[in-house]
Amino acid sequence: MISEKASQIGASPTLKISAKAKAMKAEGIDIVDLSIGEPDFFTPDNIKKAGIQAIEENFTKYTSTEGIPELKDAIIKRLNEDFGLSYSRDEIIVSTGAKSSLHHLFQAMIDEGDEVIIPSPYWVSYPHSVSLAKGKAIIVPTKEENGFILTPDQLKAAISPATKALILNNPCNPTGAAYKRHELEALADIVLEEDIFVVADEIYEKFVYDDFQVVSFASLGEDIKKKTIIINGVSKAYSMTGWRIGYAAGPAEIIGAMGRIQSHTTSNACSISQKASLEALGGPQYEVSKMKSELQRRRNYVLMRLQTVPNVSCFKSQGAFYLFPNFSAYYNKEFNNVQIRNSYGIAYYLLKEAKVAIIPGGAFGADNYIRISYTTSMENLEKGMDRIIEALSGLKTAKKVKRIALSNTITREKKSVPVDTSLSVKMKDALIAEMESHLSYQNYFEWNANINGVIVQLRTNVSHLNDFWVENWYPAQLEADLEPHGIIYAVDGIPGREPHSFYNSETNTGILINTDNYSPLRSLALGMTIDVSERLFNVFSVRGMSADIDGNSVVLVGPKGTKKTELFFSLLQDQKFRLHSNDIIFVRFSGGRALADSVERKLFIPTNTVESYPRLAALFDNSKCENVITRKDDCQDTECLNLDDCRLDRGSLYCYKASKDAHALLDPYWIDGPAKHAKRSSIRWVFILRYDTTSPPVVETEIEDALRMLESGESLGLKRDLTHSKSHPFYNPHLLLRTPERLELQREFFERLLEGTSCYLFNSGVASAEDIKKIVAVEKEKIPE
């Protein structure tokens, strides 16, 4: 339904927590909101009047995409008066907020694979904005003892040939840290030496305290100005967050590219807001000074209260309107038998128990901390700090519980890789030579797997792939003079190559390049086995979930989105059904029956299957896992993210549900012992799944109709965009060879299979596992003993 990149982007934690606090307030709950990065002051009257005047003068039409000339001039004047900078109109762009300016900037300057250095703690949207531009965020942690300042040595070490830019937030959200001139100059020397750009986010530059002198990065010299793009706006300094005006100042070429992109996204910023911003930047500035004085008073109060809290340290912020105390001393404490393990847990506890909303530091890349915003009244700050201190005093040391150390490998690559089956023998030989040059004696693994009688040898330099391979398949014993049916080279660390897979059917050779994720290797092995089994043994495969009952199997086939997993594990809840296979079976015909074999020693199961079969969670605890989520920041479960009681907040060390890319290798015998698992079964029922809310629940289908659905790889009633993946002939993504001749062989096999089975079109949108059981119960009576 949504794109892959969108599925990787979570909602802004700051806005989400603020929205939760507002919702609780709307329910009549007395919440003190210290979460929102928004001044509580009203927009100054002179600015509001300018907006009203714009409406009265009917200044309500489209403007120039990049901003009205007079507002550009006001921005130029302000930068000159404040920092001595000189810009022309073609070096300024006005956008719908500084966030929009950043987004358009990254789209304009970042190519796929470009790296952007981001010091942490960082504003929550930086990494996502870079990711949406197909860049790579390089996070560099700063230290509290260094004032949360990026050091020259850290910057130098983070720069690579792929580095495009550094983001420098000064003053910083969330820490309030600000850079002195000499600190900026040391970074500028490296920027010029390494020829990278600086994105200088200076949205908080008006709010610095204790006579601190803020310095704009672009003001350090003409050379550095050419490498700097300033991001700023009126939201913070003039309390105009809802007016949505931000701007960028930088080289004309970059600003022009931003303008072209903006012309196809937001177009111009609000005309009325532009007129109001003109007054903000060009009019009297005394309201800004009043706000700054009040914010400093509030900062001093909150800092004083935090300094009285046992075991809490807090950096004295020099700017912005946040404090960023270290609350890690309160981790591993508990309330109501719920253990706090991280900053999200503290945030959850304070919201639920103290009725105070703060932002967890984990959202900013610093989990030991929390962010407190002091953009509220002194009365609220006093009430909020009283509640926080009281709530912390009520926490107790958690009982020591022996926790299972999950065997979990986080891989660099997470997704499937493209497969090229047109590999010639000559090209195959060249690739093998390249692969073997990277298989050193010190880091070489080789193991023979027996996959339904097909011997597949793995040669790899990735210990994780070898580990999972050995666990997944039955071992194959080869005599010294015998060769395997096929060989797979899985080699990581090949310079200049993207993750990719190749297969040559003539020599039964597979090549997997630059991926450490097991899923593509397993799929390549199954594809090779399918190819060899069909050609040599006349054995075919069915991609589906198979449950056995008294030696006869129910096979569920269909695309993603048809609730196949939910149906399958609902069947297994019934003691009469046994697990046969959760993914693929290999079928041979004997005595008029279609005998299906399960070929995996340990089943490769997505860990989010626990939603359908919760009992698996305890079994996964003792299994080898891949890419199980251990940090809330990595969670991909949108539904869970929208809840306020994430299991990771509540003490769990990991979450099986949080990622669709996580898998476990599960011994099927662990599910109620050997009696609950069938290695061979005779196929008796085939259910082809569809999903809608209007069609009949179950219809016995004609063979030709079933074959048409199987060949297409799509399901009636299910829109393609719901599957979030392309269709595969016979619902089998492991099929490598899809020539007309090979697909015709598949068709002939399925025709023969369906002639000896009962085949149903099953609408999982309205029918359930109980309907399958009823059909099986009726037809079982007709099966001869």
Image (tube, grey):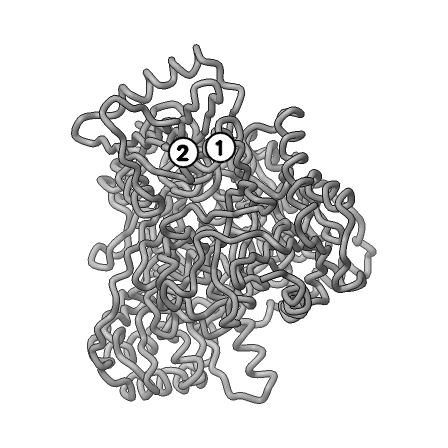
Q: Position of residue 89 (x, y in %)?
A: 61, 36
Number of marks in the image? 2
Q: Which of the two discs, 2 and 1, labels the residue nearer the N terminus?
A: 2
Vertical placement of residue 550 versus 251, above or below: below
Q: Quadrant of residue 520?
A: top left
Q: Report the residue marked by disc 2.
A: 454
**Circles 2, 1 touching at the beta carbon (< 8 Å):** yes
Residue 657: mark in rendering: none
Q: Is residue 296 visible?
A: yes
The residue lying furthest to the left in this view is 442
Q: CA distance from mark 2 to mark 1?
A: 7 Å
Kind of residue at badge 2: Val
Question: Left or right of 742: which side holds 519?
Answer: left
Q: Rate crowding at label 2 as few (under 14), some (14 to 19) or many (20 or more) other CA atoms within 10 Å.
A: many
- Residue 492 or residue 702, whichever sits in front: 702
Q: Position of residue 201 (x, y in %)?
A: 45, 48
| Mark sitting on residue 533 | 1
**Which of the two residues, 547 or 243, is positioned nearer the viewer here?**
547
Image location (x, y in percent) of residue 52: 74, 64
Relative to 637, say whether 65 is above or below.
above
Residue drawn 48% across and 67% down?
613
Residue 282 at least partly seen: no
Does 599 appear above or below 779?
above
Residue farthest to the front, as pictured: 785
Q: x, y (%) of residue 725? A: 61, 44
Q: Residue at x 67, y 43 (%)?
A: 67
Q: Quadrant of the C terminus?
A: bottom right
Q: Could you tell whether 288 is left or right of 479 in the image?
A: right
The residue lying toward the viewer, choosing from 267 and 396, is 396
- Amino acid type assigned to the residue bearing label 1 in the image: Ser
Horizontal relation, residue 270 to residue 10: left or right: right
- Numbered disc 1: secondary structure: helix
